[in-house]
Every structure is written in structure tokens, then in C-alpha cells.
Amino acid sequence: MDIILYLLNYIKYQNKIIGQLLNFICRYIPLKQWAFDDSHSPKYQKFKIDELPKIISFKQDWEWTDLISYYKQRYNKTIKPVFRRGECNIPEDCRCHLCNAPFQYLMWNDGKKKSQLLCKVCQNRFSPSDNSRFSKTSVLRCPHCSHTLVHKKDRKHFIIHKCVNPKCPYYLHNLKKVDKEHLEEDYGKNKYKLHYIYREFTIDFFKMDLNSLPKNASSLKFSKFDSHVMSLCLTLHINLGLSLRKTKQALKDLYNISISHQTIANYCKTAAICVKPFVDNYDYSVGKVFTADETYIKIRGIKSYIWFIMDAAKRSIIGYQVSDNRGVGPCILAMRMAFKHLKEIPKDFKFIADGYSAYPLAAQQFFRESKGKINFDITQVIGLTNDDEVSTEFRPFKQMIERLNRTYKASYRTTNGFDNIDGANYDLALWVAYYNFLRPHKHNKYKVLNKVDELSNADNMPGKWQLLIYLGQQTILNLQKAEGSNCS
């Protein structure tokens, strides 16, 4: 018996030591699956996207007639209109704010004051002049403490809701991670994101058109020049990275063709309209790893942004977007363009990006919009050095998209910025077409990323541009036929 008691005490002691070791590992040793959270530092808490809130819906599909039928069937009780001993002074157009019962089923609930009505059908009490209590169809609540979220700020595309409950476990947990010295400073708590925050978008980025194209483009009916001159302009401007005025000078010096730089710009806009549908709807046979990043450009001297999403297996650009802001909206549009090439999310799918909070917020909106069907996590490679296992493993994928940014900047630098966002759109559409279908790549043994049989029939680059425009026209016709069949 003494041996059994000794062994039991020894097992309890071992269990205690194991618990202490696990607690030490969880606090001070960054494991692989926790490396996304930046070692739980409160400084990076503001870049973290909180989970979706609880939605309490007050919307009901039944009315007073349904309740009367239910009472009749369940309790064999018939609800009759109110029996009035005197003249009814309730307006005839007054109805119950909850079940929409007419005034025959309404009565005054506060005697001579006549400020509150009672519905005989649903037993609801309400003021006839105040409908604010029933105007809300749903309420957002904190998923940690079930406290109602407070409307804090209005942004351009979303509304910020915040949990202000001082006893919220999420708030208290984040508060413990902040040093007391920082809390005693001026605006100490405001330096960190401690409370639960939810962003409610006021614009549905999932219904916006992805095939919007530049306006004021010229037609393909040439009056002075022909399609060959147009393809020469594209070759010099897009392939060789010459500016519009240098392209004009090159055509004059090489081929004795006198053409204005504005005509070249119009040709590029027209080509972008034709080529973009083919590029966006091409079957790239994408893999299981996507990598994304954003870079800035200048439009009229103002900073704007370009979003790229690349298939890591073939290194094709499968999603791109030009925007005047760095919000989550353009990120969602670029992701929609990329996910269009996937029939379903693969089992081991990876989406690699930097530490910017727009990517996990966009992933959360995809999960919410698809009702759980599109569910994926963002693998965030943070910083420039491999300080954790996640950065060490996924740094090469991040370098791919950074290399793509520098490649695009090499062609963009000659423009010295764009005059308007339409110019940035058509330039990006043509450059993506060149990068995916016409540009030889060193890592692919100096071959194009996506081989198209029709383009291989051309002997030179101007001929390939003409065939690419033709393929774009055929894609437009096929899309129009598909839309016509869907409408009918």
C-alpha cells in the first residue's frame, strides 16, 4: 500500500511539472503555428483581424393573421377585436409595429395618458409616434462577451463597430499583454488595439463588375494607318518599355511613320479593351499556392496602388487591380479575379501575403459572403528577415511577388506616372497580357508562361499582338453569347 501511495504522489508531481513546462513553452517559445501572431506582441495587435460578430436578427416573416390561426389550432382560442365601451380615438391607419395588426386589435395601455398602445394579438406595447425600437432588423454582438457593439466611426467603404464592455474577456486578455508603464503614459491604451472591432462594409465588392475597361477608346477602323502599325506601337511601348513619345520617335526613325503620341495612346486603349477579356478568362490551370502583394504608382502626382496576385506554380498573374486607395475593397476585387480560376478551394491551399491587415479582412469577407464555402487562411510573411519558422518556409514565395513588382516598376518608370486612372488601367492590362503570354521567362527556360497555339503561328511580335487582339475579340463574342443564353 505504501508503494502505491508513493507512485500516485509521484505521478501527481510529474503532472504538475509537465503543466509548468507546457505553460513555459506556450509563453516564451514561438511555435510554428503561433508565428503568425508576431509572438503575441500587443504592438501588432492593430493589424490583427477579429472574428465575425454574433448577429441577433429580429426579422420575422409572420403577421397577426398567422398568430390568430396558430392560437386557433393550438389552444382552440379565437382572438376577437377589442370590445370598446366608448368611441375609439385610435387612428384607423395605426397598426402594431411588431405584427402589423390593424387598429381594431389595439387598445390604450396607460389609461388617460394615451401614450402607449397594447396589441391584443402579440401583447406588444409600443408608442404610436415612435417606431425606432422596431426599425432595427438585427443587432451585432461581441462574440466574446455578447455585449452589443457600438457604432463608432464611418469610413469611406465601411462602418466601425466596437465592443466597449470593460469586462469583456477579449479586452482583459489584451490588456494583460501591455506593460503597465505604457498604460500610465498619455494615450497609453489608445496606442494598442485592445477592444473587439468589426468593420461592416457599406459597398458590396462581390457584385462589382470585374471587366470594367477604359473609356474614350478609338475603334479598329483605321483611316490613316493599319493594324500592323498598331501592333508596332504595342511592341515598342509594352514589350520594350518605351514611353509614348519615344515610341513615336522610334517609329519615325525606324519605319518613317509619322504618328502622334496621343494616337499611340488611343491604340493602346483599344487593344486593352480587346485583350483584357481573353487574359482574365483564360484557363491558367492554377496550383494550390497563391502569393499577393501591392505596390504604389503615381497618378497626377498622387500615390495610387496596384495589386498583384500570382500563381506560385506557373508564376502567372491571375489577379490584378488599380486603385486610388489601399483599402480592402481593391484587395477583394483582385482576389475575386484570382479565385475565378478555381472551381473549389483545394485541400492544402495556401495564400501568402505580407503583414497588411487587408488580406485577412478580405478572406473573412469571402467566408461571410460564401456562407462558409470559401474558407482559407492568410499566411503572412512579416518583416525582411527570417525571424520565425513561417518566414523561413514561405519567404521564397514572397520574393516571387516582390520580383514581379520590380519587373513592373521597370516598365512603369519610363512613364513618370499616369495622367489618369484609365491610363493606368489600360497600361496594366496590356502589361499583364505581355507578361503571361508573350514575355520569355528565364525560370521557364526562356519560354512563355502560357503557350497558346494560335500565337505560336506568328513569326514576329507584331503578328502575335494582332493574334492576341483577335483572340480577345472572340472571347468577347463568346461572353456575349453566354450572357444572351442566360438572359433567355
Image: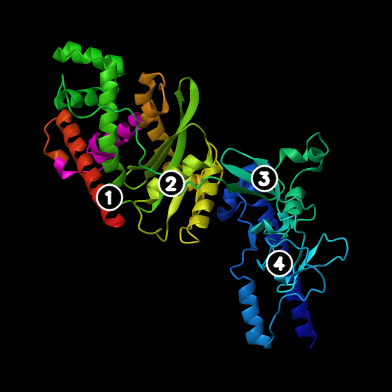
Could you tell me how far apart the alpha carbons at marks 3 and 4 are, in whole angstroms? 60 Å
Q: Quadrant of residue 140?
A: bottom right
255 is higher (above) or lower (below) than 25: above
Residue ID for mark 4: 103
As measured in the structure, the alpha-carbon distance from the residue carrying label 4 to the one carrying label 2 is 53 Å
Element class at badge 2: helix
Residue 335 bears which disc, if any? 2
First along the sequence among labels 1 and 4: 4
CA neighbours of label 3 inside 10 A, class few (<14), some (14 to 19), many (20+): few
Q: Nearer the viewer, residue 284 or 176?
A: 284
Q: Earlier in the sequence, mark 4 or mark 2?
A: 4
Q: Is residue 442 visible?
A: no
Q: Which residue is drawn at the image coordinates 44% and 44% (left, top)?
A: 333
Q: CA distance from mark 3 to mark 2?
A: 29 Å
The correct choice, above or below, for 447 with respect to 176 in the image is: above
- Magenta stretch contains residue 262: no
Q: Which residues are magenta?
A: 426-454
- Label 4 Cα neighbours within 10 Å, binned few <14 / some 14-19 / many ≥20: many
The secondary structure type at the circle numbered 4 is: helix
Q: Which SS class for mark 1?
A: loop
Q: Which residue is mark 1?
A: 283
Q: Position of residue 469 (x, y in %)?
A: 21, 36
